[in-house]
């Protein structure tokens, strides 16, 4: 019922101002998540065992949609295999001045400069404690804009959500918080992951720790990220966040707005970086592909480039739950001969060279 209602609402939502549409979607999904929901059947061909977790399918919702842990139950009811909440910060934060969210309709893309607007750790924790959904939920966290010690904000995130989340993600790659991406540099990243991993390991149950990185890293920077993440005990990388680049061919006038670009124009860039990380990590760390997924073909590209799991955001904003059903059906068909695991990284060299773009 929930997927059907969401499909009917999608054209109406796409006519609203972007932030108004987003708030309406969260409110509706929050209401739906409070209803008794029938169990959704899952295709066994799509099951993924990773990080000690059993994912019913490899398609997840990226952070940025349910920023404050309000609607995870409703989102999981749409058919996602997992949902990532956040980005959350220790204290509530209004984010950057409006307007800060722009549809590039002609390019099926989005530019955002939201600035980690969210309700803060304490309220999100209360919501998860009060109504922890049946399904896999990750929590993505970062520092307040005015934090005097950004690493301490990340450490507090691990301490706060390790008892509640199925996995933890540190966001060091948003372009909309000044200086945040500097934490991707080797020395800064080494200290950050070391301290967050220590906090994670002190929790009663060890949670997988993921690091979300930018698509704009050069090869030397990617080498540093991969080496530090492996050495310091991170479990995975999410590749990638939004880009500050503007690929050629964009036609929407909103493309000139500052902020991070997401959607299909990000697909080639993020998938190339994903493939290069796969070849460098050689299985020592697992990868989640994010950026430009809008159907089964692009989701499969992420898997063939080296991703064990795939996340969507902008495609879901434009297409709604239809995207989930079509993507899972396409991946199930691709998995028919030998399973999804056999496809992981199968074309990584092609994507790394740009030959499969």
Image (cartoon, rainbow, N blue to C red):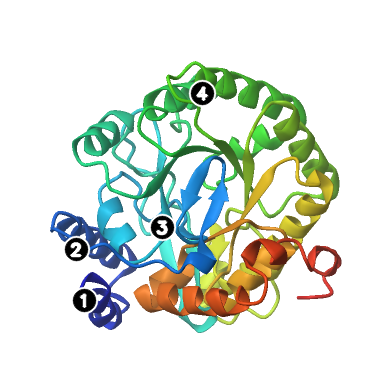
Residue density around tag 3, few if under 14, some if 14–19, many if 20 or more, within 10 Å: some
Q: Is residue 163 left or right of residue 311?
A: left
Local SS, label 3 = loop
CB within 8 Å, label 1 to label 2:
yes
> Which percent across, then down, holds residue 197?
58, 23
Depth order, front residue of 282/101:
282
Mark nearer the N terminus (1 vs 4): 1
Of badges 1 and 2, nearer the viewer stands: 1
Q: Is residue 242 visible?
A: yes
Q: Is residue 96 visible?
A: no
Mark nearer the N terminus (3 vs 1): 1
- Residues at marks 4 and 2, CA–CA distance in whole angstroms: 33 Å
CB within 8 Å, label 2 to label 3:
no
- Residues at marks 2 and 3, CA–CA distance in whole angstroms: 22 Å
Mark nearer the N terminus (3 vs 4): 3
CB within 8 Å, label 3 to label 4:
no
Of badges 2 and 3, nearer the viewer stands: 2
- Residues at marks 3 and 4, CA–CA distance in whole angstroms: 33 Å
- The residue drawn where x is 37% and y is 59% is 99
Local SS, label 1 = helix
> Which percent across, then down, holds residue 113?
47, 53
Q: Which residue is mark 1?
A: 5
Q: Is residue 155 left or right of residue 70?
A: right
Residue density around tag 4, few if under 14, some if 14–19, many if 20 or more, within 10 Å: many
Residue density around tag 2, few if under 14, some if 14–19, many if 20 or more, within 10 Å: some
- Residues at marks 1 and 2, CA–CA distance in whole angstroms: 10 Å
Q: Which residue is mark 3?
A: 100
Residue density around tag 1, few if under 14, some if 14–19, many if 20 or more, within 10 Å: few
């Amino acid at each position: 019922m929930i997927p059907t209602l969401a499909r009917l609402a999608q054209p109406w939502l796409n006519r609203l101002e972007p932030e108004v549409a987003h708030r309406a979607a969260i409110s509706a999904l929050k209401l739906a998540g409070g209803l008794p929901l029938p169990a959704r059947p899952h295709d066994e061909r799509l099951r993924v065992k990773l990080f000690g977790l059993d994912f019913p399918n490899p398609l997840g919702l990226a952070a940025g949609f349910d920023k404050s842990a309000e609607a995870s139950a409703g989102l999981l009811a749409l058919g996602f295999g997992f949902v990532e909440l956040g980005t959350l910060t220790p204290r509530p934060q209004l984010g950057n001045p409006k307007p800060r969210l722009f549809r590039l309709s002609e390019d099926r893309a989005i530019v955002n400069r939201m600035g980690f607007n969210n309700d803060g750790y304490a309220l999100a924790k209360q919501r998860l404690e009060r109504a922890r959904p049946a399904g896999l939920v990750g929590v993505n966290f970062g520092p307040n804009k005015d934090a005097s010690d950004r690493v301490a904000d990340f450490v507090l995130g691990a301490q706060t959500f390790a008892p509640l989340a199925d996995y933890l993600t540190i966001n060091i790659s948003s372009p909309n918080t000044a200086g945040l991406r500097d934490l991707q540099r080797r020395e800064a990243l080494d200290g950050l992951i070391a301290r967050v991993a220590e906090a994670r390991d002190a929790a009663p149950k060890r949670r997988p720790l993921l690091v979300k990185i930018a698509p704009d890293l050069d090869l030397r920077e990617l080498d540093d990220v991969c080496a530090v993440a492996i050495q310091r005990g991170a479990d995975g990388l999410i590749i990638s966040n939004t880009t500050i680049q503007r690929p050629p061919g964009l036609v929407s006038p909103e493309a000139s707005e500052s902020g991070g670009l997401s959607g299909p124009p990000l697909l080639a860039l993020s998938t190339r970086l994903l493939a290069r990380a796969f070849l460098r990590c050689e299985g020592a760390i697992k990868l989640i592909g994010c950026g430009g997924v809008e159907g089964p073909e692009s989701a499969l590209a992420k898997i063939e480039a080296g991703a064990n799991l795939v996340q969507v955001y902008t495609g879901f904003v434009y297409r709604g739950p239809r995207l989930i059903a079509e993507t899972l059906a396409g991946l199930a068909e691709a998995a028919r001969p030998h399973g999804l695991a056999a496809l992981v990284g199968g074309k990584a060299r092609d994507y790394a060279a740009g030959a499969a773009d």
